[in-house]
Amino acid sequence: MHDASSDTGPAFAGPGDASAASAQDHSLPISVKSLVKSYGAFRALDDVSIDIRSGEFMTLLGPSGSGKTTLLMVLAGFVRPDSGSVTFGDKEILLLPPHKRDIGMVFQNYALFPHMTVAENLAYPLKLRRVGKAEIRERVERALDLVQLGGLGHRDIQELSGGQRQRVALARAIIFEPRILLMDEPLSALDKNLREQMQFEVRRLHEQLGITTVYVTHDQREALTMSDRIAVINDGRIQQVDGPRALYEKPETYFVANFIGETFSLPVEVAGDSVTLFGQPIETGAPLAHGDKNQSLILRPEILHMFEGDPDPGMNRLSGKVRQHVFQGDSVVTYVTVEGERELAVRRQHRSDETELAPGSDIQLGWLVQDTVILPEGDGSS
Amino acid sequence: MLRKAATATQITHLQRLWLYVVCALVIVFLVAPTLLVVPMSFSDSRYLQFPPESWSLRWYEAYLGSLEWRRATVVSLQVAGLTMVVATITGTLAAYGLHVSRVKAGKYVSVLLTLPMIIPVILLAVGIFLTFAPVGLNSTILGLVLAHSILAIPLVLITVTAGMRNFDINQEMVARSMGASRPWAFLTVTLPQIRNSVLSAALLAFIISLDEVVIALLIAGGDKATLTRRMFLALRDEIDPTIAAISTLLIGLSILLLALSQFLQSKRD
């Protein structure tokens, strides 16, 4: 079993930023223990426990109805769980109303106040804290600069574009220096280009402020790009909490393997430490996590390599027939039939000097022993 | 005006003339009886007469000169004003609660609250009279205000609920996360955005109370008689054009308030 706490860090903008270090003292760790929340017979949260470090960017990733938003709403104080405990720092906050929790929130639909200008929106939390007029003006200016909206304070919300509204929502959530920032699919209403740009901005802002951030999304790419760690949630349960790279390369449950990335699975038989795939033994890099007899081999298009002869040493192999090539610009996906029926995909970088094997050719597929992932099907909570 | 069909299937205004005539007749039928009192109120005759033979303002003078009529007017305005306050506050709170509530029973509560709109008012009036009698609320301003609020709350509820439909409740959640208590978040974020609906509902509540007669007939006795009650009783005793003058004033006020209410609703954001 690999180290479950391995933290591969964010995909860009490395840690150790000087300004983040000082801000981190201000933010708080979150500890969630044994949360249960039922709506009638439906268990939205089924014994959820998770520890979020101070200053960490934690993403809750899962399909709709998985419980990720319910968990966020429990943290915010808008949903009261049936049982469990939530601490910010060493303070139990489950019984605190939302307005006493000192959290910043960003919603998918921005939730800006349309009857106020941009500056009035930003001043709202400061006025509640009885900050003086001059200081409010100064902090609003600074917050607007931080999200690159300097000089737009007098604008009406209706005059702003979608991306600008999201920036205002973000600025409003951090202007009062909350200890924790909660975001509920904040970028899903934006178009693709803008979304990618905002992902970078949110991440940059997080680096700059070092605030503990809990980010909810159903978009795996967004989660992989932005997070320090990701908690994958399904059916009200946490499936796995890990860094993006560990989550992708070493999924611990069948659900995680299939939810993240493109996945193909083949049935394997397990007996002790030996694994057979279609009657052929295959190697595993590490001892298996589960002892079940019938499990699945998880293969991704980019870990597979095609050989006309034997695969390189140190690789597991599987023979198949080329069915079709699909040109995708930067890459070429080759669909390969194995064992007559089953189909796998192999992704390669596109190279103009390579010739493609004719459909129907016999080939060998190989993948590194260390990339071999074997998991039992089912909910994988064992 | 389109006289000639541009295509084979287009219908010209001329071909639809019969439809316009029918519509005009319906409108006349609906409005004429109400407007009949206006010319009658300016009549010089001692009797209600249409069309009047000569014109004067004497019945308006009679109304303003009568202590009884003035007293009834004051009662009516007091009751309408207080009903407006009571019904608007309770109705708005109910609309808000039902809007944000995730309780399934909310639907039934909503129906229950609109029930006074479909129950015959005379039944409601009898019920209220019998309920008020042992606690001494008959012939009091408070009793009238409570009774009229029963009638006005459903309209406030419907009007404000319609206004809330466009409001994004996430805004209130954001306000609360930023440190606003729930009532403060409602007052500073929600209320300003449903303001027009609430004001429009308040005007409706005022009109309902001002024009109400059945309940007033049963429970508004003595010096707490409302204008409408006194008018009704006056009609029974003698046919006096003063009634026409008062009616004209009431119609004018109601139309004004209703127009204002509609205007506010159309400006809803």
Image: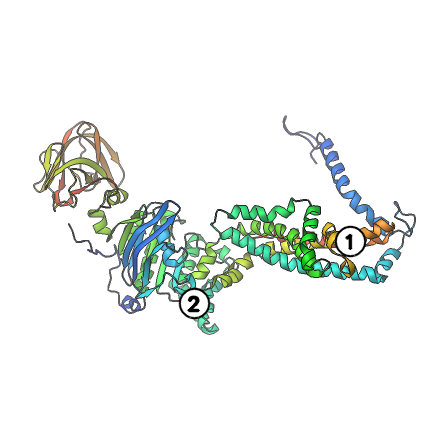
Label annotation for residue B229 = 1
Asked if the residue at tag 2 contacts the one at tag 1, i.e. Cβ–Cβ closer than 8 Å, the answer is no
- Around disc 1, counting alpha carbons within 10 Å, would you say few (fewer than 14), some (14 to 19), or many (20 or more)? many
| Residue occupied by mark 2 | A141
Q: Is residue A234 found left or right of B91 in the rendered image?
A: left
Q: Give x and y (percent) for residue A114.
A: 51, 57
Number of marks in the rendered image: 2
- Give B166 or A132, whichever is nearer the viewer: B166
Residue in view at x 33 percent, y 45 percent: A63
Q: Residue at horizontal 69%, vertical 34%?
A: B2
The residue marked by circle 1 belongs to what chain? B
Q: Disc 2 residue type? A: Glu
| Coordinates of residue B90 in the picture (x, y in percent) | 59, 57
Q: Is residue B150 above or below residue A267?
A: below
Mark 2 Cα-neighbour bin, 10 Å: few <14, some 14–19, many ≥20:
some
Callout 1: helix, strand or loop?
A: helix
Q: Give the residue type at disc 1.
A: Arg
**Marked residue chain, label 2:** A
The residue closer to the viewer here, B1 or A156, is A156
Residue A159 location (% of width, % of height) = 50, 56
Q: Is residue A197 visible?
A: no
- Label 1, label 2: how many angstroms apart (C-alpha)? 62 Å
Instruction: Choose top left, top right, bottom left or bottom right for residue A143.
Output: bottom left
- Residue B25: image x %, image y %? 76, 37
Q: Name the residue nearer the viewer: B35 or A326.
A: B35
As drawn, the residue found furthest toward the front would be B134
A23 lies above or below B145 = below
User: Residue A11: which quarter of the image?
Assistant: bottom left
